[in-house]
Image: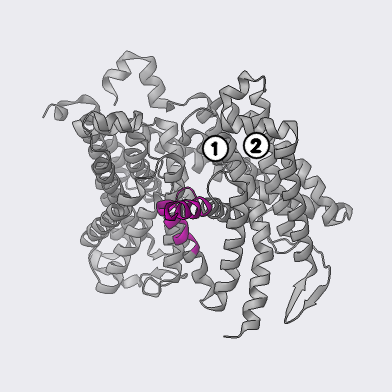
Amino acid sequence: MNLEALLASSLDGLMLGFLYGLMAMGLTLIFGVMKVINLAHGPVIMLGMFVLLVLQQGMGINPYLGLLAAMALGLVSGILIYFVALHRVINAPELTTLLATFAVNLMIIGLATVMFTTSSRSVDVNLGTLPLGPATLQGTRLAAVAVAVVVTVALYLFLYRSRIGKSIRAVANNRSAAELMGINSTWMLALSFGLGTMLAAVAGGLLSTLLSFTVLSGGVYETKSFVIVVLGGLGNPTGALIGGIVIGLLESVTTVYIPVSWVPVLEYVIFVLILLVAPAGLPEWFKNLRRSRS
Amino acid sequence: MKALQNVSLWGLLVVIVAATAIPILLDAPAMREEYFSMLMVIVLASSINIIVGYTGYVSFGHIVFFGLGGYVAFWLMQTFAMHLAPAAVIGGLFTSLVAMLIGMPVLRLRGAYFALATIGINEAMRTFVTNFDPFGGSVGMFFNFSVYDAYGGAKAAGQLAYYAMIAVALAVVVTSFFIKKSKFGLGLMAIREDQDTAMVLGVNPSRAKVITYTVSAFFPALAGAIFFFKNGIIEPGAAFDLHRSIESLVMVMLGGYGTVAGPIVGAVLYDRLRTFLITSETFSSLHLFIAGALLLVIVLFVTAGIVGWLRNRFTLVRRYVE
């Protein structure tokens, strides 16, 4: 086993992990605010991919500019999904909201299949490579990480510094108390759902600059998002970022040691174990561990 | 046994037997194929209703038991030339055992966490089987055509599979009925409404949930064994198809969550609708979209499902349909 291969794959994994984290952050934000597991997360990731593709092939727009359009579409479609599918059942038991978002999932995939068929696509973008010691970094990956970091920082500033962001956090903490303070909780819920899907669309757009995809690709990334979100603790955005990096590293580093096809087995087994042993996620679990020691 | 005199159970059984007898009497193989798939979705929907409808635990990845039972039975039939009946029963019992072992830790989780865990278990199993060489890995396993000779040819084997599926469907309906009518079933519904209160009132939730989960895993395993026996081929994608699992939940919601007749009605209607949409020229490309829109309407506006809605509306229905 050579150290160089290990280093190269960990760098790759780290960069992919940032993207995974961004993608899962949307799911965890929605769960944190309204206790809904969004089964339409994957299709929105897929929409983000296709926005970039259509803009590039149809109008020759640079994919990185296309990201802005993907963000806007993500935000708008999220708010729309909230009012059409969720608003009526927001206080209903899990099965109802799970199936409502799954219905949206079917509708989006159904329409997209009609429009784009299920053949494999890729966005054509090349930013060259950057040699770094033994490893070679791809420009697209670096750009994706840069965008992911910018979006994450912007999200944090929004949630912690702006008045609307504070209102969203208030609604997440205690909806009725927030309403008593004069916050319009319906709009805050709709907006946070929109923010969650916006993150999914951006992450999808960035992923499309790295890998090829189909209309059905969203499903794979959706289950991956579940794994990441559970690792980091449901409803914890920082945890999602950590979980994303863990999964990104796991996917790239373990391939040095075990066959690629065994990696998903490992991922899902870890996923179920985390749910059983530390359902609050790894960060909380470590925190409790330290507390119990001291 | 007061339950044995219940009109609603006998009514359901008579309807199922009468309907499934039609293709046999008419000797119509194409029709039999359609009824076979309908019977299978009845088994899947009714068994998922036993855990989801009665206890309120949303088992999203219930299809894992269909796949596992199918795989074990297929492996037995292929490797040891075992007959379908013992292979299916062994596959079913093994799957129930696995469900019990999985259920003991996983059923401690509540709500969304449980739903996510069941998805994880199904995906873990699917990816594991994809790498598991004795089960043929990602390619899966397939029968040599001569396997069917023991049953008197492929045609006779298809007929046997049909009868077997009828038997499993009747068994799951009877089980579902007796669970609902028993004291045990009342305990389950108490867990569904409020687990902590149920515990205070003397229900042992963890034991009741594990038993229910084990029972509800048995029937999909049998259905899997019969389905893949008839198919003659099994591979991980078809066996552990999460989509099929969610579709069974849709059927339960469509017919009526927590009722005995609901999953049957929902399964038949959904199966008919899907067949119609896929084969229709106008709708075939839009069938996913239409199925999604329909599901959304049910979830938002008819939460009790068809049977539940009728039961709430008409006393006569409430008296005769469980």
Tags 2 and 1 in contact by the CB under 8 Å rule?
yes
The segment highlighted magenta reads A267-294
Q: Secondary structure at mark 1?
A: loop
Q: Residue at x 43, y 56 (%)?
A: A293
Q: Position of residue A260 (x, y in %)?
A: 54, 73
Say what amino acid the circle numbered 2 marks: Phe
Q: Position of residue B36 (x, y in %)?
A: 36, 48
Residue A137 highlighted magenta (yes or no): no
Say what amino acid the circle numbered 1 marks: Val
Q: Position of residue B172 (x, y in %)?
A: 27, 42
Instruction: Give the quadrant of the N terminus of chain B.
Output: top left
Q: Chain of mark 1?
A: A
- Outermost residue, right direction? A60
What secondary structure predominates along the stretch shown in magenta?
A: helix
Q: Residue at x 29, y 60 (%)?
A: B157
Pointers 2 and 1 within a single chain: yes
- Mark 1, residues whose alpha carbon is within 10 Å: few (<14), some, or many (≥20)? many
Q: Secondary structure at mark 2?
A: helix
Res. B221 image quadrant: bottom left
Residue that carries the numbered disc 1 in the rendered image: A36
Q: Nearer the viewer, residue A128 or B18?
A: A128
Q: How many marks?
A: 2
Query: Rounded to the nearest whole Å, what is the CA distance between mark 2 and mark 1?
Result: 10 Å
Residue B285 seen in the figure: no
Q: Is residue B55 above or below residue B61?
A: above
